[in-house]
Amino acid sequence: MSILSEKTRLVVWLGAILAIGFLSTTIGGYIVSRDSIRHGISAQALPLTADNIYSEIQKDLLRPVFISSLMAHDTFVRDWVLGGERNPDAIVRYLAEVKLKYETVSSFLVSANSGKYYYADGVLKTVQPGNPADKWFYRVRDMAEPYETNIDPDMANRNTMTIFINYRVLDYDGRFIAATGVGLTLDTVNKLIDRYQEQFRRRIFFVDPQGTIVLAGKSMSEIRGSIRNMEGIGTIADRILQTGSTHSHLEYTRNDAQVMVNSRFIPELGWFLIVEQEDLEETAPVRRIFFINLAIAAVAGLLVFGILVPAINRYQRRIEAMAHEALDNAGRELERAADQQQFVAMVSHEFRTPLAIIDASLQTLRQLEADTPPDVTARHRKIHRASARLQELIGNYLTGDRLRHSEAAVRMEPLALFDLVAATGRRSEWPQLHLEAAAEAATVQGDPELLRIAFSNLVSNAMKYSPEDSPIRIACGVRDGWAEVEVRDEGVGIAADELPNIFDKYYRAAGNKASGAGLGLYLVKQIVELHGGSVEAESTPGAGTTMRVRLPLAPAA
């Protein structure tokens, strides 16, 4: 289950990394391309289109302004009005000639003196201040600008909605004497805008300074009113309607599409030219490539997984087989080790009984030493020492086996430390053994059997590396709130570079000729630490070694 879970996590992580990598690259490329196209439209295409349209407007829409200006500054017109408007046929022929020559739908002149409205076919009417249809004339009379562009019904052309250029005519002293100009039908202008839109593939319309749409093509035939109230463009209407300004980088959102806007104020018309373009058409190839890349990424990911998952499964099966084989081998090794350990433990227990019999027999023979030849006594002592070493080795092994099993019971009880150490020292039968006890008795909480083995190993270690006639001193006392036992010998000592390793399991110093398995000091450290204490060694080569054990004092009763 764990291996399967690891494999699943690996596949998921690899899939996530591949997906993130593909998506980051694809989406990043799409965003960069889209933004580049938008910037190109906003910074280059739209301004260039606006300039081209402005050039077309100058040719198509500003031409009537120029014609009206010529009419207003024509000396014939001035002189005819100032001459009392005699011979009306003269001005009618003039207006007819202007209409014919410049191909306008209307040409007119309204006299401030008589109020007569002259056009190409005669006199249309006389303007009256109270007539709403004539308000434009009095507005032109009172305005400061030289002309205005106005959309009104053309009564001379069956009330067709017409764009009039109303130009002020002044006498030679600058006084208003008439209004003149020409007109273009809205249908004609709308066709021009439609032609612009088809030519430049943009949406084009005109608004007045208040934001009202005054001219638009067929694509906006249903849209009326102010751009301030329109969705999307209303958010940037105030920036568009800044008279005299040109904005090339305005944007808004319409129907989930980003719309780039270029606005330009045309003073000759008094209107704003607005050119719009959505990014959907221009970015369509980029979106198509984006989705193609996503499809390629998905196919590539599936191919990678199609190769990767079987490979992972193969390697997993190989690893599982190797793991099972290793576990089987380890199990067999553990079984062999357990059998071997059990056998050694059994043999050790079996050896203790005959060794005890041998030791008891030697004790009996020692009582007869007075009648025993010296060479026999020497042999008895060698047998005794060999028996003692063998018993120590067996005891160390059994103690180590006991410490390896954490469930082994440790019998903790209050112990008089000096009595325990003294009894251990006396059993060693070392001729030059000296016991020193401090005035303050030390009582510890411990397992008497384990502590006896620990101190017995310390004394035995000192005996192994000391001449038979050299002293071994055991001191017991209390220092800094701890019970302390020191075992000092005057033997060969231990080299400084070997001192940190003497408590390691099976460690024997280089050149060491003394018998032993390297377990004694290791067991000392294990037993002392089991009791919450510590052991350390100090040594001077050739001068002896001091082993120092510190144990916690038993709580006061």
Image: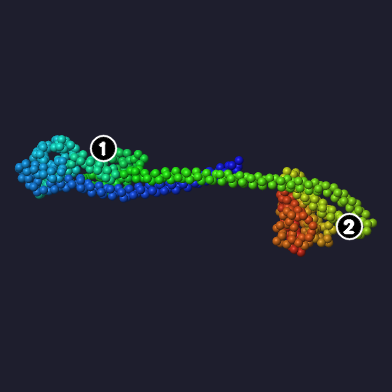
Q: Quadrant of the N terminus?
A: top right
Residue 218 in which image quadrant: top left
Q: Residue furthest bottom?
A: 542
Mark 2 or 1 closer to N-term?
Answer: 1
Circle number at residue 379: 2
Residue 462 in which image quadrant: bottom right
Query: Residue 227's x, y, as percent?
Result: 28, 40
Of 388 and 418, which appears nearest the observer? 388
**Could you tell me the amino acid type at mark 2?**
Arg
Instruction: Say which residue appears at 74% left-offset and 63% top-offset.
Output: 540
Q: Residue at label 1? A: 221
Q: Secondary structure at mark 2?
A: helix
Q: Secondary structure at mark 1?
A: loop
Characterize the local packing of mark 1: few (<14), some (14-19) or many (20 or more) Cα atoms within 10 angstroms: few
Instruction: Say which residue appears at 83% left-offset and 49% top-offset.
Output: 351
Foreground mark, 2 or 1, reads: 1
Query: Residue 32's x, y, as percent?
Result: 39, 49
Query: Residue 230's x, y, as percent?
Result: 30, 39
Instruction: Say which residue appears at 75% left-offset and 49% top-offset.
Output: 400
Instruction: Count the marks.
Output: 2
Query: Residue 555's x, y, as percent?
Result: 73, 46
Q: Quadrant of the C terminus?
A: top right
Q: CA distance from mark 2 to mark 1?
A: 133 Å
In the rendered image, is residue 11 in sight?
Answer: yes
Above or below 487: residue 95: above
**Could you tell me the amino acid type at mark 1?**
Ser
